[in-house]
Amino acid sequence: MTLIPEHLVGRLLENGAEISDNDDHIPLLGLINPETGEIWLVSELSPEEPDCAFGLFHLKSDRPRMGYFALPHIRHAETPPGLCIRRNPTFSADLPLSVYARAARNAGRIVTDQSSLETAAEELRKEKAVLDRQFGEP
């Protein structure tokens, strides 16, 4: 099974190729381990190593975190016979990864409900406003 649909590969590679201080891409893909509930929200693929993805992930014995992860490890994760890591067909995002990360930090797990995301987005807006005032940004 292909974890990343072909129509998303180009967009994920483009996101990975952008280098700036303002990179905060919308996650384009959600992956889930149906056995353990492990979740990965993918926002970028490395152009240099396309099997290396960036996003937010929550493994069963850890807290949610943002970072790089290897797609081959996900593809070969141990699952019971008949199960495998799969795309979450209901996942759709319209907010940047930082909002999902803040919501996950608040909840202790990756969440995608609108209320949690709106709360996280508002917290990030307030923090940015404080920083902008402190450092004179417009």
Image (spheres, grey):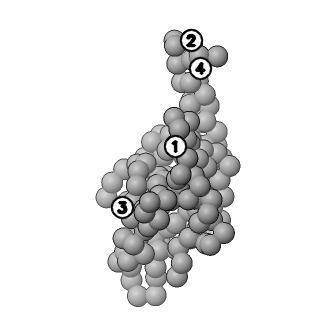
Task: Single out the mark in the foreground, 4 or 2.
Answer: 2
Tag 4: Cα neighbours inside 10 Å, few (<14), some, or many (≥20)? some
Q: Is residue 44 left or right of residue 64?
A: right
- In the picture, which quadrant includes the C terminus? top right
Q: Nearer the viewer, mark 1 or mark 4?
A: 1
Q: Nearer the viewer, mark 3 or mark 1?
A: 1
Please report whichever mark, 3 or 2, sits nearer to the chain's N-terminal start: 3
The image quadrant that residue 116 belongs to is: top right
* Alpha-carbon span between mark 1 and mark 2: 24 Å
Q: Earlier in the sequence, mark 3 or mark 1?
A: 1
The residue beneath circle 4 is 129
User: Residue at 54% of width from left, 78% of height from top?
Assistant: 2
At horizontal 53% and vertical 73% (from top left) the residue drawn is 3
Q: Which mark is residue 136?
A: 2
Give the quarter of the image for residue 75.
bottom left
The amino acid sitting under disc 1 is Ile
The amino acid type found where label 4 is placed reads: Ala
Specify the label residue 19 is tagged with.
Answer: 1
Residue 94 spot, x, y in % from top left = 68, 49
Q: Nearer the viewer, mark 1 or mark 2?
A: 1
Q: Residue at x 46, y 55 (%)?
A: 54
120 or 20: nearer the viewer: 20
Task: Indicate the position of residue 107 as horizontal and vertical percent values.
Answer: 47, 44
Q: CA distance from mark 4 to mark 3?
A: 35 Å
Q: Report the Cα–Cα distance between label 4 and label 2.
A: 10 Å
Kind of element beneath mark 1: loop
Q: Which percent across, then down, holds residue 134?
A: 51, 12
Measured Cα–Cα span from mark 1 to mark 4: 24 Å
- Which sits earlier in the primary sequence, circle 4 or circle 2? 4
Pair 4/3: label in front:
4
Give SS at disc 3. Answer: loop
Read off the residue under disc 3.
60
